[in-house]
Amino acid sequence: IAFCCPRLKKLRLSGMKDVSSEAIESLAKHCPQLSDLGFLDCLNINEEALGKVVSVRYLSVAGTANMNWKVATDNWEKLPKLTALDVSRTSIDHIAVSRLMKSSQSLRVLCALNCPFLEEDKSFSSNGFKGKVLLAQFTDTFDGIASLFADNSKKPKDIFSYWRDLTSKDKSIDEIMRWIEWIISHTLLRIAESNLPGLNDFWLNQGATLLLSLMQSSQEDVQERAATGLATFIVVDDENASIDCGRAEAVMRDGGIRLLLELAKSWREGVQSEAAKAIANLSVNAKVAKAVAEEGGISVLAGLAKSMNRLVAEEAAGGLWNLSVGEEHKNAITQAGGVKALVELIFRWPNGCDGVLERAAGALANLAADDKCSTEVARAGGVHALVMLARKCKYEGAQEQAARALANLAAHGDSNNNNAAVGQEAGALEALVQLTKSPHEGVKQEAAGALWNLSFDDKNRESIAAFGGVVALVALAKSCSNASTGLQERAAGALWGLSVSEVNSIAIGHEGGIPPLIALARSGAEDVHETAAGALWNLAFNPGNALRIVEEGGVIALVNLCLSSVSKMARFMAALALAYMFDGRMDEYAMIGESTSKSVSLEGARTMALKHIDAFITTFMEPQIFAAAAFSCAPSMLAQVTEKARIPEAGHLRCSGSEIGRFVTMLRNTSPVLKACAAFALLQFTIPGGRHAMHHASLMQSAGEARVLRSAAAASIMPREAKIFAKIVLRNLEHHQAESSKGKKVSYIRI
């Protein structure tokens, strides 16, 4: 460089292993105009040779590891033109700083940010260096820079904007300020990237404001580094996308959102990318996300997501992903064309661009959770794009988000046809079944969740089974005993969904699905209780499965759920499963001799089950209300019983005609407990307002089940609670019949 560039004025290098004396002396000899020299983040620099570059005015050795500060000060203090020196992130101590500041006749600025040995000495004071500025973490950077100017009427924190607005500038001060911008932007970025502890006060008091000031620099590389630094310093845990809320809100308070959005409109793609990254990271904070939306940030990001530059598009997609977490931003993203842009990203970079694909799919997953937005995702070709990702992409992050997006698209079965559309997309169900075998837990969890939602559609349910879904999900349930509760819940939920079909239910039993579901029923998590109990309830409808549940110790697990689960739904479905198991059909099956070799006492299990079913129902019976209801059928009295007995979530359960018929038949069972349980179940399934109450009432009316209910309500041998519940069911049927006669349209989509 020295031989080829004799007119060289500025040289800044970084990451050099060794900067030898020969190289430096060549620069000194052959480049007499060299005034700005920087060796940043190097390993070894010859300090003595630097003292021979007599033309140098601005010198930076920031981040250099092996410095002999005795040799450095001996030589550098004699440099005749040295105006500004940057020793940030080095091992310099207060002795070397004091000597340089006092001995150098020309030195005006010494920057020593993040110098641990200097900061350790609490007795060190920077006040003794008259006419010279020390920039360190323990000094006020803005005050120091402001002291360079003769006009001291300006607020120190406005010093950068004051300098930029000057119409008549002092050339030497202008050079110093441009150099300060460059070296501080570089040092702040390195400090932010290192994420060192103990710097929170610095960032809140100075660092954030400095970065925002530097973002307004006329030097484009300073702008870009400042935006990158801003994106980085707010992140405290990159792996878990955790940000420091105090720092994020400090950026927002100082007008940072508007500045970033202006930078995002730059013609330079590097600046666009870093600004979008900063906006994305800041938007993890809900307050900041709101400010981004209010400042028009959603439209800006949606526009950047259309960029042909992959890095710009990736960061923009990340911003839309974070913003789409907020329910209030979903429609705005859709209206700004964000959905179309995100779908197009997946088609534009289908291979080798993992970050783009994960972020685009993640944003679509969040948007698909909203009913209206999910329709837009499907309309924009999102189903095809997401299925393509699920089938072909090998990156786990993108697979996970694609599966989550498909799960959310399929969750709106009662309001749009996306559930069926996903199932009809070529390769969708097969791909999701394959993803349940992934070694990555997040992928398995989201794939199982998608299959769970999709299994509510009859055609999907059978197709999932045809593609090996039963075998895959049973294997998943067997393998997730030590997994997260999210994976356990979805594995059991997917089996619950498949087991609605009796063919699938029998297949799950044959494939060994009952023992892992019993194990999951023993989980300590409420959500897992519900899905495991729901699956076992469906499986217990088949007498062969019911016997397997008994033989595998499932009675005790279900009894414990009945007794102690926090979830009323889990307790309810556990009671219904026990009722199926001991209403007599399993006994007939056991007598045929098709059971396994395990020896169990059915009578003992039956006694235990009935005892706890009775205890469960009793918890919904207020003694005073029931006593009064026994003597009065007044609507107000029955309404009180209903209010006490109602399990709101049970309204989401949808039963088939054979299931409803089984509970009606159970009203004639010899067991008073099972009679009460059957009446209690029918009450839950027909309460007005329940999503499928009208469907259940229609099934019962079509089968003429009202006659059985009237007989039950009037029978002298009927338990008191069963009679009262039967009367309420009759009232519910009358209510639904009246509603039906009004021509009220009701949807019967399963959720």
Image (cartoon, grey):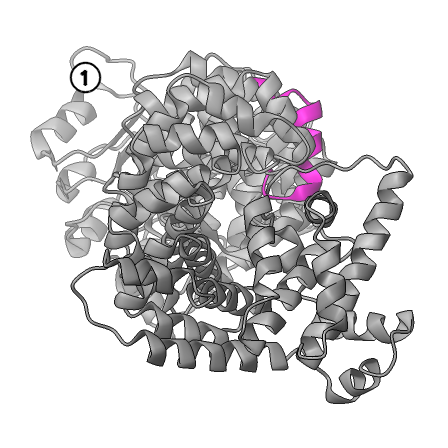
Q: Amino acid at mark 1?
A: Ile
Magenta region, residue range: 324-340
Q: Considering the numbered disc 1 on the image, is that residue within a helix, a strand or a loop?
A: loop
Q: Is residue 483 left or right of residue 66?
A: right
Res. 98 in view: no
State yes or no: residue 332 in magenta: yes
Residue 606 spot, x, y in % from top left: 40, 76
Q: Is residue 341 above or below residue 125?
A: above
Q: Residue at x 70, y 68 (%)?
A: 712
Residue 514 spot, x, y in % from top left: 31, 56
Query: Looking at the rendering, which quadrant does residue 93 occupy?
Result: bottom left
Q: Residue at x 86, y 76 (%)?
A: 637
State yes or no: residue 314 in magenta: no
Res. 120 in view: yes
Q: Residue at x 85, y 53 (%)?
A: 735
Q: Which residue is mark 1?
A: 1
Depth check: give the residue in front, 371 or 283. 371
